[in-house]
Amino acid sequence: MLRKISKWLLKANSINILFLGLLSISVLIYWLGLWTETISMVGLSFLGLISVLWILDMRFFWVLLWWCLPLTIQVDFSNSFAIDFPAEPILILLSVSLIYISLFTKAPYVKDAWQNQTFILLSLSFVWYVVCDIYQGIPLTSFKFLLAKSWYIIPGFIGFWAFAYRHSDQNRIMQGFLFFYAITLLVSFSKTILGQFSFEMANKFAKPFYENHVIYSSVLNISVCMLLYQIQLSKKGHLGRYVLWILTVISILGIYFSYTRASYLALFGSLASIFLIRYKLMSKFFLTIIMVLGIAVIFLFTQARYLRFATEYHKKVMHDNFKDHVSATFEGKDVSSMERLNMWIAVIRMSQDNLFFGVGSNQFVHRYKPYSAYEFQTWVSDNPLRITCHNYFLLQLAEHGLIGLILFIALIYRGFMRIETLYHRAVHQRNIKNIAIMLSGILTAIVILLMFNDLIEALKIGFIFFVVLAWTEVEIHKLNNQKK
């Protein structure tokens, strides 16, 4: 082993020289830190050693990312700067790694990933975001948004091709994710039980691993699809299979007691996608829903028909009982639902002035209030938490204009279409069909959640969204190679 390492180190190529340089500097800084009793230098040396480990095996950080994903928490450094730790630093490191691999090595499948049509569509969307932000003057908040988006897309899409092409690698990362997910689930659900399933405390039960009950229930939706896939892989009668079933049941109960209306729809949507994908209806159904919603918007904004749904200010209330909360939603008296409508109206009005370029990335919350409807304003309309419009499709229209919205719809449509292709091409490969069903369930859940929330920028949801797109393309790529 030592002889092999010595030969490897003596090879004159850039990555080995980089390895030796970083290792030497890290050791030197470590001893200087001990000699001068400077803790910061000792800490810096460990960062160097992490970089050395990165060079030795970049795949390790990809696996580490999946382990850390469920355990990641948001750390606020100021009112304007926060980081999802530890996953976000790993994403940044992986982004640098994958760019290095792409430019200076001949890693298998990475070139195929960059040339993939789904990635090209993703890149077009990103370029359009840049164009919109340049047109609007690139404020600092937009620049930070673009950086964060890049280190979601590159590790999520390119990283999957580079590090999870084989089924054994896919199962390893998924099992690691589910193991640590189970820890967070048991912590949050135990707090829910101890809190007597209180509706008012739902956000508190989700912490510390989930910022709020929406992100908590969204991750539960995604994980149910993964758990059901792992059950299909496990042997009947095996202890692990019973554990997976127990986790699935607890996850579904967790969704119910998260009191998140969108997550209920997402769970049913994931189950319905199994039948839609079998009859090649998934992509068509998605387009039909988009067209129906588009027609509904045009109808409601013609002659301001939407004003018929306005209720009196003092009748819009927040309930401490979930049953009353749901009833008030249908009666048009729930404050959160009315504030959603208020923001959606603001988006449509705003888009009339910024149809093509939008207002720029991360700028909706700063620009929407002059466009909101007085008739729909509530006692939470001051929006101290700076919440966006609760619909990612409308957010695209507001911030990146009509072209940004069309590109996003095209991306999701292609995702569903490619999953259908994968399912129906894997004629005699049951495992591939199960993967397609799982991916369809996850993508359906995310899309339904996006109808009521802005979750692509949430790390635990956004990263998996890009992974789903990549995973589909990887499996189709393997099927294509089998035919050659």
Image (tube, rainbow, N blue to C red):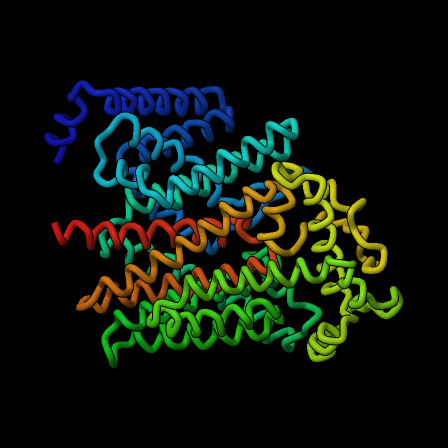
Q: Residue at x 61, y 46 (%)?
A: 397
Furthest toward the front, the residue is 303
Quadrant assignment, res 350: top right
Q: Nearer the viewer, residue 41 or 58?
A: 58
Q: Position of residue 264 (x, y in %)?
A: 55, 72
At 34% from the left and 35% from the top, the residue drawn is 98
**Residue 237 vs residue 426, the one in the foreground:** 426
Q: Is residue 368 above or below residue 343?
A: above
- Please tell me which residue is depicted at 20% across the width and 67% down the height of the picture: 427
On the image, the x and y values in percent for residue 228 come to 36, 71
Marks counted in the figure total 0
Answer yes or no: is residue 78 visible. Answer: no
For the N terminus, give its image quadrant.
top left
Evaluate whether residue 104 shows in this view. Answer: yes
**Residue at (61% x, 63% y) in the render:** 213
Name the foreground residue: 125 vs 455: 125
Image x and y of residue 61, in percent: 35, 42
Q: Is residue 95 above or below residue 265?
A: above
Residue 394, percent from left and from top: 62, 52
Q: Is residue 373 left or right of residue 247?
A: right
Q: Is residue 39 left or right of residue 135?
A: left
**Occupied quadrant, residue 366:** top right
